[in-house]
Amino acid sequence: MSEGGFFYMENVSGDERQFTMFGNGCTAKVDLLERLCSCRKFDLGIIPCDHVMAALRLKYGDDYGLRVYDYSSPVYKVEEYFLAYSESINVVPLESE
């Protein structure tokens, strides 16, 4: 979001699942249950984009910061990081050796 910009968020369905964001000359649709955002940043990276963060804040209020992890890919969690590097990684020799 640019400095001085603003977003207006509306709960479209009334069930705290689908939200529409208006602002900065664009409109984005967020579906928290399906984990989709029309900007596609959330779909592709599985890290909440600005639009999803705004929807989470509208849904959960000031406690939305703790909910970010529920909507992020497990790959970004500390436990997964430790699992990925828990075993030794062998060095690959150069082709010239």
Image (tube, rainbow, N blue to C red):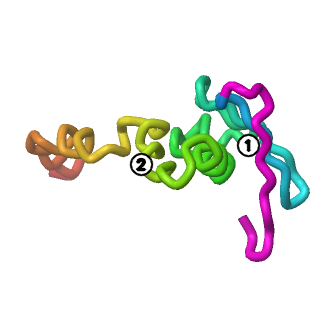
Q: Is residue 18 above or below residue 53?
A: above
Q: Name the one closer to the observer, 45 or 97.
A: 45
Residue drawn at point x = 78 percent, y = 75 percent = 4
Of the image marks 1 and 2, the number of the one nearer the N terminus: 1
Q: In the drawing, does residue 28 fall left or right of residue 43?
A: right
Asked if disc 1 and disc 2 are in contact, CB closer than 8 Å, the reply is no
Looking at the rendered structure, the secondary structure element under dot 2 is helix
Q: Residue furthest bottom?
A: 3
Q: In the drawing, does residue 44 fall left or right of residue 25?
A: left
Residue type of the residue flagged with mark 1: Cys
Residue drawn at point x = 76 percent, y = 36 percent = 11
Query: Which mark is on residue 39?
Result: 1
Confirm whether the magenta stretch covers residue 14. yes
Residue drawn at point x = 37 percent, y = 45 percent = 76
Q: Main secondary structure of the magenta part?
A: loop
x then y, percent, for residue 73: 43, 36
Q: Is residue 7 above or below residue 5?
A: above
Residue type of the residue flagged with mark 2: Leu
**Magenta segment, which residues?**
1-15
Query: Which mark is on residue 66?
Result: 2
Query: Which mark is on residue 16?
Result: none
